[in-house]
Image: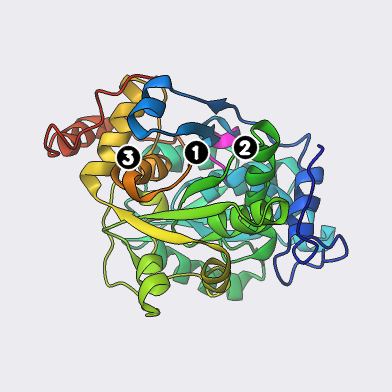
Amino acid sequence: MNINFKSKKLIKECDLHGDFLTGGLVHDAWKRLDHVVHQTPLRTSATTNLRTDKNVYFKMENQQKTGAFKFRGASYKLMRLSRAQLDRGVITASAGNHAQGLALAAYKLNAKATIYMAESTPESKVQATRGYGAEVVLTGESFQEAYEASLKQQEKCGATYVHPFDDYDIMAGQGTIALELLQQEKRIDTIIVPIGGGGLISGIAVGAKAVNPDIKIIGVQAAAAPAMHTAYHKGIVQKLGKVSTIAEGIAVKQPGENTLPLINNYVDDVITVSEAEIADAMVNMLERGKSLVEGAGAAAFAGLLSHNDQIKSRHCGVIVSGGNLDIGKLAHIQSLANQLKPEQSHAALSF
């Protein structure tokens, strides 16, 4: 774990109280999670490098425990709780991956977990969450409705709330991806990250820039759920009326209160991708990369492919955030990918 933190402003080992996000908190999470999480592999593709004129490194968090990066943040958060807090049980809302991460982390620490999820959550994610021992409550059409229901239940039962993204300990746990990535490939100059509520990109941005303040961080949202994109570029924070995207892991109706200021301060750009572009990246990863990736997990790759000319990088990290895909949706995903014109499609790329 030999990481050189270049910015003393960002790395302060004493800043571990968890009421704001620092490089020190991310580094503490990295040390404590070292033997808890998988060090996920980097993958490269000669053809993708040729197509983009960049050296591209895929950080395969779809191979993390529970199939997504969320286990990192949930584990670190629960490690920071007292036994009394754990004994009250933990409760949250989730689009699916945080649910599984928290359920497994709670199981390992002998704590009861209750998870609220939208009724549209893929069955594979629901069953996996229950399989880790959590109680699952399905309610509402999107994450936002499930979140509001979970807050009401928390007031009644007194369980410890573990927010899926708007929590500094959660962000710090997710930020360990950046430190791991930069240990694996020190030449990274740009990291492309999917954005839902912003916990992943906040942790990665603070963690990466504690190592190298010059690293560029680019966020990618689904154009069908652009709350953070709008807030970042127009300064307008609003709750979207409806979100519908194959990238359900980033289908969040409004930015996090704690994540938005961090994104404004540390993230260099936020871009959007269409449903067809996300689907095309998913098909590419499956057919050519032999990797099963969910919509949110393919969003960063879709952003690179669709905005390549605007992304100035020689060594580019792409966060493949999760692989918990409902196999029954593959035909729909292929149909969406087929909507792109031949010159727009990248599914013919070979890893």
Residue type marked 1:
Arg
* Front position among marks 3 and 2: 2
Image position of 177 (left or right of 340)? right
Q: Is residue 102 above or below residue 341?
A: below
Q: Residues within 10 Å of mark 1 (few under 14, many from 20)?
A: some
Q: Does dot 1 land on a helix, a strand or a loop?
A: loop
Most distant residue in the right direction: 14
Dot 3: what SS?
helix
Question: Quadrant of the image for the N terminus?
Answer: top right
Q: Residues within 10 Å of mark 3 (few under 14, many from 20)?
A: many
Kind of element beneath mark 2: loop
User: To which residue does mark 2 refer?
Assistant: 187
- The answer to whether the residues at label 2 and label 1 have Cβ atoms under 8 Å apart is yes
- Return the x and y of residue 340 as percentages of the image width and height: 14, 39
Disc nearer the start of the sequence (1/3): 3
* Lower sequence index among marks 3 and 2: 2
Residue at point 28%, 62% (across, down): 243
Q: Which residue is mark 1?
A: 314
- From the image, tell me which residue sits under label 3: 305
Badge 2 local density, few (<14 within 10 Å), some, or many (20+)?
some
Residue span colored magenta: 65-69
Residue at (63, 65) in percent of width and height: 167
The image shows residue 290, relative to residue 254, as above or below, that is above
Which quarter of the rendering shows the C terminus?
A: top left
Question: What type is the residue that disc 3 sits on?
Answer: Leu
In-front residue for pair 51/71: 51
Residue 43, image x, y percentages: 52, 25
Image side of residue 102 versus residue 55, left or right: right
State the residue at coordinates (81%, 45%). 32
